[in-house]
Amino acid sequence: MGNELTVAVLGPGGVGGLLAALLSRAGHRVICLSGEETARTLRTDGIRVRSAHFGDFTTRVEADTHLREPVDACLVAVKHTALDAALERVPAPALADGLLVPFLNGVEHPATLRARYRPDRVAPAVIRVESTRVAPGVIEHGSPFAEIDLTGTAVPRTRLDTLAETLAAAGPATRVQDDETATLWAKMSFLAPMALLTTRYGVPLGDVRTRHRDELTALVEEAAAISRACGGPSDPARALAGYDAFPPPMKSSMQRDAEAGRPLELDPIGGALLRAAERHGVPAPVTARVVGELSAGAHP
């Protein structure tokens, strides 16, 4: 790969749109993949970013409904609920030797993607950012940070390093992590308790950590035990300290989906947690109850 990369972005929403715009502004060729209507808007208007951290700017991108040529990397920034349909836009022969970089919640998707694409080109990533698509091609980046952990057990290290350097130069602080399992479980065990409880009770994190602290603590401890059994990190005290440091009005993306009447990522987060618990014989009664209540539609 030379200095300028060609990067496809599947799902130019809050995360995908922000990364597409930053990469394009840095001089890389960016092809956004979406439905025809969004693609038309992006081709005409580009992507407009409003960000106190990266500045307010508009940048041009290419846009199409399907990947039709090889790229250095394809960033997958759709939700699990839309993944199967979205992957039809990225035929494996078109991707060829390109990296497939899923920015998805959960821990089960890398195996799914490796069954469909070259296993040694699937490079899972974790992003910490608050970024929202407010209209097609209009992105509001709210957090004073954007941090990416890039991993991929079988991916050649030079490929990961090149992409990480490219992303970091474009804006987000990006690190390559050696341990894929630990990287994915660190995010999963931190995300799941907050997502499940903010959604179950329909309240922001500040209310969850005060009014539902016992449940939050129990979920954090269960998630940490499951993570440890799967080869991931386990530090419940650190997770709780992390929640306590967040601003009280913070909401999870699952909660925002529930408020908007969108499908919930309940199975890849709560379901995957329970499947891992069962596989390793780790008791998770509180997680099972909360996931069951959410499955039954118990959220405001």
Image (cartoon, rainbow, N blue to C red):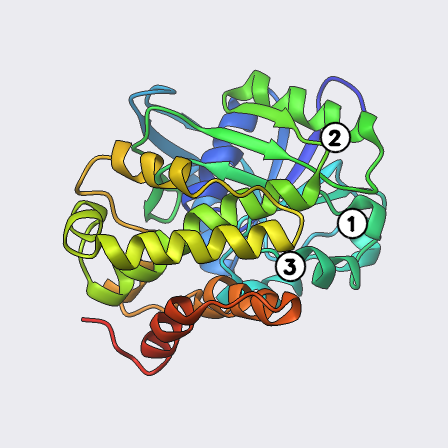
CA gap, disc 1 and disc 2: 16 Å
Question: Callout 2: helix, strand or loop?
Answer: helix
Q: How many marks?
A: 3
Quadrant in the picture for residue 98: top right
Q: Are marks 1 and 2 in contact (CB under 8 Å)?
A: no
Q: Amino acid at mark 2?
A: Leu
**Labelled disc at residue 109:** 3
- Image position of 75 (left or right of 40): right
Few, some or many C-alpha atoms within 10 Å of disc 2 (few <14, some 14-19, many ≥20)? many
Few, some or many C-alpha atoms within 10 Å of disc 3 (few <14, some 14-19, many ≥20)? some
**Does the rendering let one see residue 134?**
yes
Q: Residue at x 71, y 37 (%)?
A: 179
Q: Is residue 59 above or below residue 236?
A: above
**Does the rendering let one see residue 26?**
no
Question: Callout 3: helix, strand or loop?
Answer: helix
Q: Amino acid at mark 3?
A: His
Q: Residue at x 51, y 59 (%)?
A: 36
List x then y, in percent, for residue 114. 78, 57
Q: Nearer the viewer, residue 124 or 74?
A: 124
* Residue at image mark 2: 160
Of callouts 3 and 1, the N-terminal one = 1
Q: Nearer the viewer, mark 3 or mark 1?
A: 3
List x then y, in percent, for residue 51. 32, 26
Q: Are marks 3 and 1 in contact (CB under 8 Å)?
A: no
Of callouts 2 and 3, the N-terminal one = 3
Q: Nearer the viewer, residue 223 or 145?
A: 223
**Labelled disc at residue 95:** 1
**Labelled disc at residue 117:** none
Q: Is residue 297 above or below residue 207?
A: below
Q: Residue at x 17, y 43 (%)?
A: 249
- Of all residues shown, which one is farthest toward the bottom? 296
